[in-house]
Amino acid sequence: MLAARPASARFAMSRNKDALPLPEDLRVLLTVIRKNGFAAAADELGLSPAYVSKRIQILESTLGTRLLHRTSRRISLTEDGERVQRWALRILDDFQQLHDELSDAHASPRGRLHICSSFGFGRNHVAPAVSLLAERYPQLEIRLDLFDRVVDIIEEGFDLEIRVGDDLPGQHIGRRLVSNRRVLCAAPAYLQRRGTPQTLEDLQAHDCLVIKERDNAFGIWNLQGDNGVEDVRVSGPLSSNNGEIVLQWALDGRGILLRSLWDVKPLLEQGRLVQVLDGYSQSANVWAVYPTRLAHSGKLRACVEFLQEHFKSLSL
C-alpha cells in the first residue's frame, strides 16, 4: 500500500510547467503578507476577500507549492512562501524600473504612490500638497496614511514618508524638502500671570506643555542657542500625544509650548501667542524619506521634486 503524498508533493505534481505567475498575483500575495490577512488585504486593494483568496490559490497552483499556512486567526509563510516573497519583491521592483525607463515617468508619472506622514503635519501640510500633486499628475493613484508612531516604510509597504525632524533612518534615502524650526511661545495671559522666562533654567519653574510624538524623548527639549545644543527637562500639569491639542492649551493660557514655526507663525503675527527665549529654537526640517531601491524611480523623483517646490514656496 502506497503512503499518501504530502500536500507539497501534490502541488508539485499539478504544477503547469509552462505557466508563469502573474505580477498582479505577486502583488496580491505581498499585500496579504503585509496586512496579515485576506480581508485586510482585500480592503487595501479594493477587492473582495473571496477574489483575493482565489488569486492566492491560482498563484499556489501555478508555482506548484503552498505559500501560506492558514488558520482561523492568522496566516504565516511556508518556507517556499518566504522564498517567493523575496523573489516577488525583486520582480515587482524590476517591473517598476522597466516601466520608468520605457515611459516618460519623470515628466508624466503614473501608477500607485503610497505616502505616509505624522498626524498634525500630515493633515495640515502634506494633505493639501498631495491634493495639488494629484492635480499636477492625474495619472497617479495616491494613498496618504497618517500615524502618530514610527513607521517602517519597507515593512509596511510605503513608497515615501514625509517627516519632520533630522533623526533620519540611515538605511533609507532622505531629501530635505524645506528648512523649518520649532520655537518657544505662550499666550499673553499666561505670561502676565506667571512672568516671562529669561533663561532656559527658568523653564523648569514654568508650566510647559509637553507633546509625546513618535519616538521623541518625553519631557526633554533639545534647544539650539549661541552655545550649541542644550537639553532642558520640562514638566507641567498638561501633556498629550497630539500637537493640535497642546497648541489649543497654549492658546488657552495653560503654559509654554515648543511648536513648529509653520504652525504658530500666524498666531504670533496675530498676537495670540508671544515668542519667548528668542535665541533658542529646535531644528524641525521637513524631509522626504524613501527606500534605496526606489532611488532611480522616475515617478518618485517627480513627486519629491514637486513637494520640494511646493514646500519651498511656503517656507518661512
Image (cartoon, grey):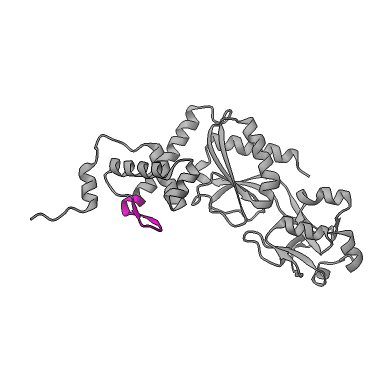
Q: How many marks?
A: 0
Residue 264 lies, with reference to residue 88, above or below; the image says below
Q: Is residue 70 magenta?
A: yes
Quadrant hosting residue 283: bottom right
| Residue occupying the far left of the picture | 1
Q: Residue at x 26, y 44 (%)?
A: 64
Image x and y of residue 299, in percent: 55, 35
Is residue 286 visible to the viewer in this orientation of the structure?
Answer: no
Using the image as rendered, state which of residue 200 and residue 257 is in the foreground. Answer: 257
Image x and y of residue 81, in percent: 34, 50
Residue 283 lies, with reference to residue 197, above or below; the image says above
Image x and y of residue 104, in percent: 54, 27
Image x and y of residue 279, in percent: 83, 58
Residue 144 as seen in the image, left or right of residue 246: left
Q: Residue at x 56, y 46 (%)?
A: 290
Using the image as rendered, state which of residue 285 and residue 225 is in the foreground. Answer: 285
Is residue 272 visible to the viewer in this orientation of the structure?
Answer: yes
Q: Quarter of the image containing the N terminus? A: bottom left
Q: Residue at x 58, y 37 (%)?
A: 301
Q: Quarter of the image containing the C terminus? A: top right
Q: Is residue 120 magenta?
A: no
| Residue occupying the far bottom of the picture | 205
Residue 177 as seen in the image, left or right of residue 278: left
Using the image as rendered, state which of residue 105 and residue 207 is in the foreground. Answer: 207
Residue 46 as seen in the image, left or right of residue 222: left
| Residue occupying the far right of the picture | 192
Using the image as rendered, state which of residue 68 and residue 198 is in the foreground. Answer: 68
Q: Residue at x 70, y 38 (%)?
A: 310
Quadrant hosting residue 273: bottom right
> What range is drawn magenta here?
68-82
